[in-house]
């Protein structure tokens, strides 16, 4: 097959895969895996190339933290956190909505956003069950907050790590370079969530009174496992923050934490019961979401191999004509729109050499600083545009589906996409104001 035919075929497969996901004609994991299979059958990707495009770090991070959450849940840890969070907000649904979103954003800035939502989502379901509220508004707000918070720091979102490494930007550079606009965007997001959801959320006074009267400590059902969970989760969070210094990947930390917590939980059991306990924890892993990621990584890898992403990137570079404001604006918006439908990691990896090549025409490497910020803001904030825009979105959708709360593609997009556009527009104003 010629290169032009491969380009057309890979692009068509990507479009058809996304059409199937959007229309929800079939399960999204089935659609993604079928798209990946067709790429291999047509010879656009070899089996080794397909495997190479699968981000096992993301898969390992998801699987490991799902196991940690499954084991820790048995101790009553999340029930305790849920009761305390609800009581601190006086059992006000609007207050809880804002508090959980803010906590999600802050944790996502210090950790990665996928880990954060896997820890916060179980708390959300417990709170909503006690107040007999739909969990959807809370989870929706947490998804957007996780991607916004992750934008602020070097370690909050994988694209930032790639950009920081390529442009020699450190943690403080990100925090002070784009942290201010992220804080403003998050504040406005909290306001929007309150106006859309918070003012309409009502809990029965009897349910609120019951929550306020709950004994949070009484929710702890296994003190030994609680202590183990706190030590393991705390150690994992510390390791995530020091991962770059220790040369560790997120998957290594998450799977190591999962194995350690399983070991500590099973030390007190006879061998014949250990197998059942491990199988129970493994059953909590959302395999549908993991296999969806496998298929999606391969499908996006197909269009990356045939040069579609590189073609878009170089076309963009040609259009800016050496203008720094135009370059930053174009990269911001293209990154945001493409990251809403594509994995932002391969896109950012493709864009990095293109941005570097702009240096002579823009006035040297120092002139690239606002362009790097535009790439980071667009790639990270764009993930809020659709349900498939970021790993955190799909992780929450998978957890929600297992708890009977469906996330529909268009239902999510009709609110999330305009919010994403508004946040990117604010980022555009910030870049012009501060850097030009």
Image (tube, rainbow, N blue to C red):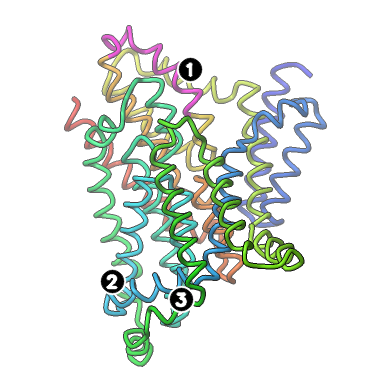
> Per the image, is 361 magenta?
yes
Q: CA distance from mark 2 to mark 3?
A: 24 Å
Horizontal relation, residue 78 to residue 265: left or right: left
Looking at the figure, which quarter contains the C terminus?
top left
Mark 3 in CB contact with mark 1 (< 8 angstroms): no
Question: In front of the other: label 3 or label 1?
Answer: 3
Q: Residues within 10 Å of mark 2 (few under 14, many from 20)?
A: some
Closer to the chain start, of discs 2 and 3, is 2
103 over 73 or under it: above or below: above
Horizontal relation, residue 300 to residue 41: left or right: left
Q: Please tell me whether the stretch drawn in magenta is mainly helix, strand or loop.
A: helix
Closer to the chain start, of discs 3 and 1, is 3
Q: Which residue is mark 3?
A: 220
Q: CA distance from mark 1 to mark 2?
A: 47 Å
- Magenta range is 348-365
Q: Residue at x 47, y 72 (%)?
A: 223
> Per the image, is 216 magenta?
no
Viewer-closest of 235 and 2? 235
Mark 2 in CB contact with mark 3 (< 8 angstroms): no
407 over 2 or under it: above or below: below
Q: Which residue is mark 2?
A: 95
Task: Name the element at disc 1.
Answer: helix
Q: Which residue is mark 1?
A: 314
Looking at the figure, which quarter contains the N terminus?
top right
313 over 32 or under it: above or below: above
Q: Quadrant of residue 421?
A: top left
Closer to the chain start, of discs 1 and 2, is 2
């Amino acid at each position: 097959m010629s290169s032009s035919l491969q380009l057309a075929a890979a692009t068509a497969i990507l479009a058809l895969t996304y059409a199937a996901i959007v229309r929800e004609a079939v399960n999204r994991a089935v659609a993604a895996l079928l798209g990946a299979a067709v790429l291999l059958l047509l010879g656009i990707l070899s089996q080794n190339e397909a495997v190479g495009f699968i981000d096992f770090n993301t898969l390992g991070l998801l699987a490991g933290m799902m196991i940690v959450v499954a084991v820790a849940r048995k101790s009553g840890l999340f029930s305790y956190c849920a009761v305390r969070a609800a009581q601190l907000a006086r059992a006000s649904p609007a207050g809880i909505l804002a508090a959980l979103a803010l906590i999600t954003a802050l944790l996502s800035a210090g950790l990665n956003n996928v880990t954060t939502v896997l820890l916060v989502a179980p708390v959300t379901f417990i709170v909503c069950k006690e107040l007999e509220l739909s969990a959807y508004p809370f989870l929706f707000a947490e998804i957007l907050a996780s991607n916004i918070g992750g934008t602020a720091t070097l370690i909050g979102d994988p694209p930032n790590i790639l950009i920081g490494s390529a442009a020699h930007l450190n943690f403080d550079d990100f925090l002070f370079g784009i942290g201010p606009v992220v804080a403003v965007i998050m504040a406005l997001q909290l306001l929007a969530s309150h106006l859309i959801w918070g003012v309409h959320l009502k809990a029965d006074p009897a349910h609120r009174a019951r929550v306020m009267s709950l004994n949070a400590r009484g929710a702890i059902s296994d003190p030994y496992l609680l202590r183990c969970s706190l030590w393991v989760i705390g150690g994992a969070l510390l390791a995530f923050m020091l991962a770059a210094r220790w040369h560790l990947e997120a998957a290594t930390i998450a799977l190591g934490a999962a194995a350690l917590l399983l070991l500590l939980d099973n030390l007190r059991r006879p061998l014949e019961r250990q197998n059942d306990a491990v199988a129970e924890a493994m059953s909590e892993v959302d395999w549908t979401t993991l296999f969806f990621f496998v298929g999606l990584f391969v499908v996006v890898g197909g269009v990356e191999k045939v040069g579609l992403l590189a073609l878009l990137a170089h076309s963009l570079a040609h259009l800016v004509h050496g203008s720094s404001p135009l370059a930053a604006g174009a990269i911001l918006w293209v990154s945001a729109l493409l990251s809403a439908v594509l994995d932002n990691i391969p896109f950012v990896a493709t864009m990095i050499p293109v941005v570097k090549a702009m240096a002579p025409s823009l006035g040297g490497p120092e002139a690239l600083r606002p362009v790097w910020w535009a790439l980071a803001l667009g790639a990270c904030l764009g993930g809020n545009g659709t349900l498939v825009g970021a790993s955190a979105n799909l992780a929450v959708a998978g957890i929600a589906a297992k708890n009977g709360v469906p996330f529909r593609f268009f239902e999510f997009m009709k609110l999330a996409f305009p919010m994403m556009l508004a946040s990117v527009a604010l980022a555009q104003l910030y870049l012009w104001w501060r850097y030009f």
